[in-house]
Amino acid sequence: MNGTILITGATAGFGRATAKLFIANGWKVIGTGRRAERLEALKQELGDNFYGSVFDITDEAAMRTALEALPEAFRDIDILVNNAGLALGTGTAPQVPLKDWHTMIDTNVTGLVNITHSILPTLIERRGIIINLASVAANWPYTGGNVYGATKAFLRQFSLGLRSDMHGKGVRVTSIEPGMCETEFTLVRTGGNQAASDNLYKGVNPLTADDIANTIHWIATQPKHININSIEIMPVNQSFAGFQIYRETQ
Ligand code: 8X3
């Protein structure tokens, strides 16, 4: 047995792929999420080393209750993977309903700091690892990224700050910043528009959830004297396009 890892948002995408990979490598996995039926299906697939913990990351009380209810065998958490998060909308700022901004902040920022604060004492005791799923949007602004990018920039800086605060405690912290990856991400972002999602990834050969799971596993299995501070990953077919210039006169 390698240890115990808690993965938020384990019902899909990066979280689900990471849960499967760590189970395959002999870890105990706590997968969290809102969708009980998906966690139950994962439990059926992954067996007794998987524990599904059903709660909404934006509900602080439910999160605390769920952590308190963890079975004894799953309480010694060595790694926290803060994966739960979302983007809503691709419109520019004036087009985005304020509630969408609030949902992203509540999930990507507030929910994430709440669970991190709750598990930190255990991670300090066990000289554990915190792995935060940020995004290239933390580093590279793009039109329509507005609050989504800002939440991910928070997450990158929170990771680096935590790393500083953990100085001398043996706790490691990493910010992973993935680019285009074909998961349910764009379906969620576009309100379920499968055609928009298919079009975005068409011909790109994007990252996959398994690519990110492999990265998380690589980070988790580095020797204890190594901290990966941040890692930015893009598919080869995604790169940078420079600044946009608006001309007031022709
Ligand atoms: C999202 C990354 O490149 O699809 O986190 O906007 S990208």
Image (tube, rainbow, N blue to C red):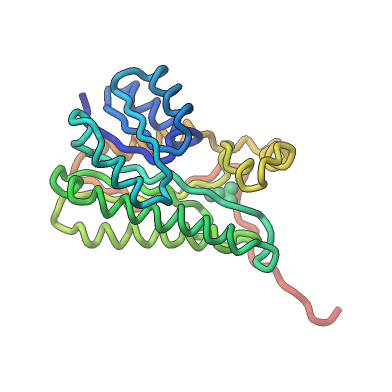
Residue 173 lies, with reference to residue 202, above or below; the image says: below
Quadrant position of residue 48: top left
User: Horizontal placement of 114 versus 176: left or right?
Assistant: left
Observer-nearest of 62 and 145: 62
Residue 73 locus on image (x, y percent):
19, 28
Residue 153 visible at all: yes
Quadrant position of residue 55: top left
**In the image as oriented, which residue stretches furthest toward the bottom?**
249
Residue 231 visible at all: no
Residue 236 locus on image (x, y percent):
58, 42
Q: Identify the residue at image location x=52%, y=56%.
A: 103
Observer-nearest of 111 and 80: 111
Q: Identify the residue at image location x=71%, y=41%.
A: 193
Residue 218 lies, with reference to residue 144, above or below; the image says: above
Q: Identify the residue at image location x=26%, y=51%.
A: 118
Residue 120 locus on image (x, y percent):
23, 51
User: Horizontal placement of 227 versus 186: left or right?
Assistant: left
Residue 54 lies, with reference to residue 99, above or below; the image says: above
Quadrant in which the N terminus is drawn:
top left
Residue 37 locus on image (x, y percent):
47, 27
Q: How many marks?
A: 0
Q: Identify the residue at image location x=35%, y=46%.
A: 62
Quadrant in which the C terminus is drawn:
bottom right
User: Horizontal placement of 166 versus 250: left or right?
Assistant: left
Quadrant position of residue 158: bottom left
